[in-house]
Image (cartoon, rainbow, N blue to C red):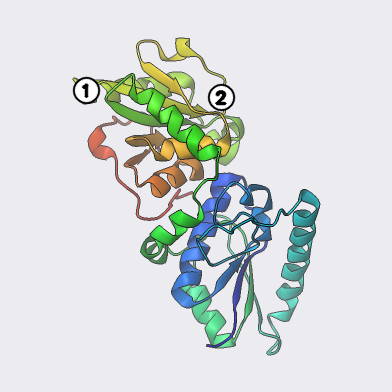
Amino acid sequence: MSGQRYLIIANKTGQLGNRLVVYAHMLGAARERGWTVLNPSFGEYADHFTGTRGRLATQDAEPLVNPPRLGEVEREHFYRLNRAGYKLARTLHHLPIGGIGWARAREVLHYDLEELLDRADARGWRWLFTQNYHFRQHAWCARHAGHIRRVFTPVEPHRSAGEAAVARARTRGDVVIGVHIRHGDYRQHLGGRFFYELPVYAGLMRQLAAALAPRRAVFLVCSNATNGPEDFAGLAIAPGPGHMVADLHALSRCDHIFGPPSSFSAWAAFHGQVPYRMIEDPAQPISPRDFLIPASPDPKY
């Protein structure tokens, strides 16, 4: 099919990790089927990554030379236009004219992007507006993972800050394990199902440290929880950089990562190709054998 076709992410799906996961699956689908991703909803995070800095439409992974600076007001303007387009498309996609499509993922069920783009091709859609978090196509995302990782390379100083944090951790041990402690909104998220108190994380860390002996384990902790050395007595602890993007990059440079089901740690494992263990039941024993490298970002929930 000739001419440009746009796959549009029309709403803000949570925070950074969620938006990266949706964006990645959309990019995999777009490259597989010859679309361009248009994503004004990524506005407040776009300047933190080389492939999205100064862009609203994403196809090329190479960073722009002297990228244009899109200010907060401009990005909000584009986002409001995007939302208006989505609402208009919700009506127009029923009509056999205009080439405008619309799709909304349900709250808990994953929407297969292959099925969606098959429908778009059959109906001749050229502007396809999508809403919500659960759009996925794992095979396509895995196939185009190298491109996706290049698009979402953190810019400086986040990249250096993340790598420096891991380098400092390596001076204290033989194996660096990234630990994502998610508190904050997890007290309410899914009824608090994946909110674990600090002693739970410390217990899992001690299990891993024992399993890895005689190699010395050091734990790089990235968290939105208030914690200190006294919470992890007897363990070698190193702090993350403290900025969300630098923390994400630091986790992606560890030897292993574990945390509760979260798009944040799932993304770090995918981007860095790091063995990952998602803790769905903290009562289950944890072992280095349980960690797997994800082929695509898959937070599951």
Q: Position of residue 61 (x, y in %)?
A: 50, 61
- Is any atom of residue 193 visible in this view? no
In the rendered structure, find residue 215 and report the number of the disc placed on it.
1
> Seen in the image, is 148 located left or right of residue 284?
right
Query: Quick check: marks 1 and 2 in contact, CB under 8 Å?
Result: no
Q: Is residue 181 above or below residue 79?
A: above
Q: Is residue 244 above or below residue 236?
A: below
Q: Residue at x 35, y 30 (%)?
A: 177
128 or 280, which is in the foreground?
128
Q: Residue at x 46, y 9 (%)?
A: 230
Q: What element does badge 1 sit on?
A: loop
Q: Residue at x 49, y 80 (%)?
A: 118
Residue located beneath label 2 in the image: 225
Mark-to-mark CA distance, 1 and 2: 28 Å
Near mark 2 (Cα within 10 A), the count class, few <14, some 14-19 or many ≥20, is: few
Q: Residue at x 52, y 28 (%)?
A: 241
Q: Could you tell me the amino acid type at mark 1?
A: Arg
